[in-house]
Image (cartoon, rainbow, N blue to C red):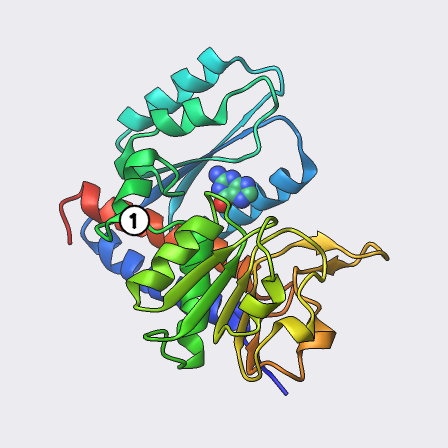
Amino acid sequence: MAEIISGKVVSAQVRKRVADETAKLKEKGITPGLAVIIVGDDPASQVYVKNKEKACDEVGFYSEKYALPADTTQEELNALVKQLNEKKEINGILCQLPLPSHLDDKEVINLIAPIKDVDAFHPENVGAIMIGDYHFLPCTPAGVMELIHSTGVSVEGKKAVVIGRSNIVGKPMAMLLLHENATVEITHSKTQNLSEITSGADILVAAIGKAKFVKSDMVKEGAVVIDVGMNRDENGKLCGDVDYDDVFDKCGYITPVPGGVGPMTISMLMQNTLTAAKIQNGID
Ligand code: GUN
């Protein structure tokens, strides 16, 4: 039977750490500031952005929200990013994705000053992660690493398998595991003999976006199973990429959905914004 890894508990610990450090920074007259840009009225994005603002309040940050209409032009969006790049009170900039289809997210990401890129999506930050010399870790993979650490299971020398190869999760996830000396395999929709590979994993990270895709025959006995998925099942109920009930008795540790990776992502964003504020104020 598995031990449940609670994202709620671990994310509260991260937020407490960030809040404590923020209080100390404020004594020096520094308040970390985050700007969040949202374009259009996608309901899921609205919820994410609201939660980000709430988290900023909770840890003591200054925050600004820019809610732009769906017909915002690329020029208008670019101009806002450039303005925020120069704004002293703002240490971190996040442009909520996806953008409406007439806007180019790559163009926006490339415009954000790398030192304010708290998503770690800018190519300069992606490259920094590749060579292991970074300021910011992408929020979801960084949150996954915190969850793995919370189990006390050492990553070093373990076989880690990542299902999914997205730029936001799968690829950087593999890098972070590699930095901690795991032997890492990235799998994806074209991988042959997937079950054979995943069932050898001591650490399995599922980030493919397919509801309840990972079954018990794909999991090694006692494995650490991290579920990055956020899907709806046949009854419209929120579920992950892992078939939780099927896998629960076989693995050693498992993250639930909701309440696993989800709460971690915003906490790691807070962590990155704090780091950005420290660097921009010459504090290590
Ligand atoms: N949309 C969904 N997740 C994210 C995220 O982590 N960052 C941004 N910018 N947009 C998102």
Most foreground residue, 261 or 163:
163
Q: In this rendering, does residue 30 appear at all?
A: no
Q: Amino acid at mark 1?
A: Ile
Question: Who's the residue at 86% across and 57% down the image?
Answer: 235
Label 1, ligand 1: CB separation under 8 Å: no
Q: Is residue 252 above or below residue 24?
A: below
| Crowding at mark 1 (Cα within 10 Å: few <14, some 14-19, many 20+) | many
Badge count: 1
Q: Residue furthest bottom?
A: 1
Looking at the picture, how far across and down is residue 210, in whole percent? 69, 53
- Whether 198 is drawn above or below 187: the answer is below
Quadrant (top left, top right, bottom left, bottom right) of the N terminus? bottom right
Counting from the top left corner in percent of width and height, residue 33 is at 35, 41
Q: Is residue 117 above or below residue 9?
A: above
Q: Is residue 281 left or right of residue 243?
A: left
x and y percentages locating residue 256 in the rendered image = 63, 69
Q: Nearer the viewer, residue 191 or 226?
A: 191
Q: Residue at x 30, y 56 (%)?
A: 22
Instruction: Please give the residue where the numbered disc 1 appears in the rendered image.
Output: 129
| Residue at 48% over, 64% down | 161
Out of 192 and 49, give the one closest to the viewer: 192
Where is residue 99 shown, x and y percent of the image? Answer: 57, 28
Q: Residue at x 15, y 54 (%)?
A: 284
Is residue 27 visible in the rendered structure shown here?
A: yes
The secondary structure type at the circle numbered 1 is helix
Spot the residue most to the front: 192
